[in-house]
Amino acid sequence: MKHTHLLYSAKSALVAGILAVSLLAFSFLSFEPSVSRAITSNFTVTQQITNEISFIATTSATAMVGSIAGLTGGYATGTNRTVVNTNNATGYNMTIAFPTTTSGRAMQASSTSYIDDYLPVGGAATSTDFSWIDPTSGNPARFGYTVRASSTGEVSSFFMNNGSACNAGSTETNDRCWARPSTTAVMIINSSTPNSSSTSTIKFKVAVPSNPNPALPAAFYYATGTLTAIVNP
């Protein structure tokens, strides 16, 4: 009887041991990471590229073509060509200003010898005349400008026309939409996309009537313009 009890106890211990080992093996397989012949892992490489803008080319000095007689009058024109490059996603804008000491007299030989700024019918710096209006005899000489862009839609709206009026329509035309120089910066170009050769052409004109008043002493008259191009936000 005692022998039978010991044999039963040994069998029970063996079964319990086998169950314990089996449970331990199952736990290992359940909780340990699986092992395979290939694994994958993703990662990201980041490099920032910043906005940049530069003048590729610009006319440093603009010489008016031809001289003008100081008594009988006449007119002369000249052009400034500027090329801008930017990688900015929203493009850039460019302004022009004429920082003279006396407002309304951008072109001067001295503080007492000057050519008055062109005065469009609207009078404001963003007003433009579809056609240049020559000063009549006995009136001041005038200096003004107009702008064109190489890409449609880049030039400011007040240099656009509809065939008869400025600040209307979507057409750019040579020798149309003349503006007055301003000591305050005026936006002339607004490009909405990146570009590598955005070209703007500013055309200047001086018109002197016969017997201008004030009189124009013989001299070289100068106007200094400042172009500023910045990336759009």
Image: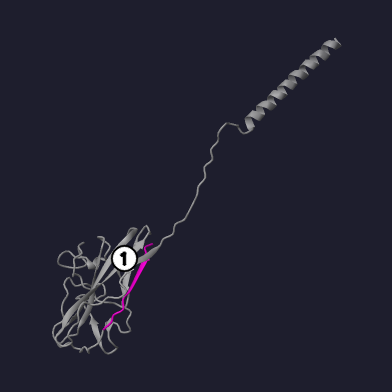
| Picture coordinates of residue 38, whole percent (x, y) | 55, 33
As drawn, the residue found furthest toward the right would be 2
46 lies above or below 83: above
Q: Is residue 59 magenta?
A: no
Q: Secondary structure at mark 1?
A: strand
193 lies above or below 224: above
Q: Which residue is mark 1?
A: 83
Q: Is residue 226 magenta?
A: yes
Which quadrant: the C terminus? bottom left
| Picture coordinates of residue 1, whole percent (x, y) | 85, 9
**Image side of residue 92 versus residue 141, left or right:** right
**Image side of residue 136 versus residue 52, left or right:** left
Between 165 and 219, the one lying in front of the other is 219
- Residue appearing at x 82%, y 13% in the figure: 5
Q: Amino acid at mark 1?
A: Val
Q: Which residues are magenta?
A: 221-233
Q: Quadrant of residue 167?
A: bottom left
2 lies above or below 37: above
**Image side of residue 168 versus residue 95, left or right:** left
What is the number of callouts on the image? 1
Q: Quadrant of residue 185?
A: bottom left
Between 136 and 151, the one lying in front of the other is 151
Q: Quadrant of residue 138?
A: bottom left
- Residue appearing at x 20%, y 83% in the figure: 141
| Picture coordinates of residue 96, whole percent (x, y) | 31, 72
| Picture coordinates of residue 164, whole percent (x, y) | 14, 67
Q: How is the image coloured?
A: one colour
Q: How many other residues sit within 10 Å of disc 1, few (<14), some (14-19) or many (≥20)?
A: some
As drawn, the residue found furthest toward the top would be 1
- Residue appearing at x 66%, y 29% in the figure: 27
